Image (cartoon, helix red, strand yellow):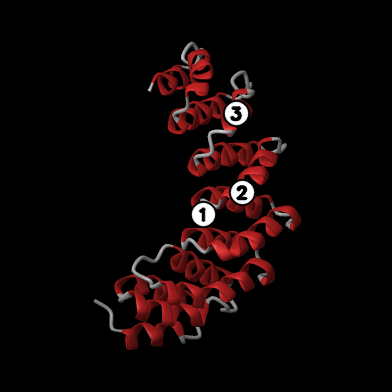
Amino acid sequence: MSAPETVQALLADGDWGRRLHGVEQCRQLAPTAAMGLLKEVITDRNARVRYAAVSQLGNMVGLSPTQKQELLPLLRERLYGDSEADVQAAAADALAGLGLTEAYEDLERAYRESPEWLVKFSVIAGLGVLGDARAYSVLLEALDADIDLLQLAAIGALADLGDVRAVSRLGKLVTHPDWQVRLRLAQALQRLNSPDAQPFLATLAQDDMDLVAQAARG
């Protein structure tokens, strides 16, 4: 197991590859020690290092509510201020993954204002994970997006949110030309488990694509 001092030396190295290795080594440290070190490199001059550090922070388990609050302003800064879309997207993932409901308005703003589809995708997927009821209307908007991946993310996020009001709106997609959308739809309707979903699931159970039909049958 790596010692914090060893990892800290890697993170301070002039070679970005060594710093990236240091970020990976943080996985072997206790959460508090890892968090303290990762906080120092989420503003690294190399985008790959920043991305790795932000992503790892968003997936950390064992952090206290107080520690999560410490990360809130730092991740907000990456969401709005980073020069790279993938780092911004990772920050959106992290805010949601850490359950920081205080960031809901930040995530909604990023969805509406960012020109980057990757950021929008991460926000929509993240809103489902966050589980904040305020996301319902934003997720419905994303169902009408002209980017298929956003539609897919919105379907899954509505299932994550668990609001059965979405069933009737989701049902309008049962004849969508993309079978992957219909598959995600069948999975979402099964998870929502509402009586109103049954007619839509019955239709999907007769789908020409076997994967869709099987998912609809449960």
Q: Secondary structure at mark 1?
A: helix
Q: Is residue 99 visible?
A: yes
Query: Mark on residue 170?
Result: 3
Whole-angstrom CA distance, mark 2 to mark 3, is 16 Å
Quadrant hosting residue 143: top right
Q: Which residue: 46% across, 14% down?
A: 205
As rendered, which of 193 and 7 lies closer to the eye?
Answer: 193
**Residue beneath disc 1:** 130
Q: Position of residue 79 (x, y in %)?
A: 63, 66
Q: Amino acid at mark 3?
A: Leu
Q: Residues within 10 Å of mark 2 (few under 14, many from 20)?
A: many
Q: Is residue 15 visible?
A: no
Three-letter amino acid code of the residue under disc 2: Ala
The three-letter code of the residue at mark 1 reads: Leu
Query: Which sits in the foreground, 184 or 17?
Result: 184
Where residue 82 appears, as percent x and y from the top left, is 66, 70
Pointer 2 with pointer 1, Cβ within 8 A: yes
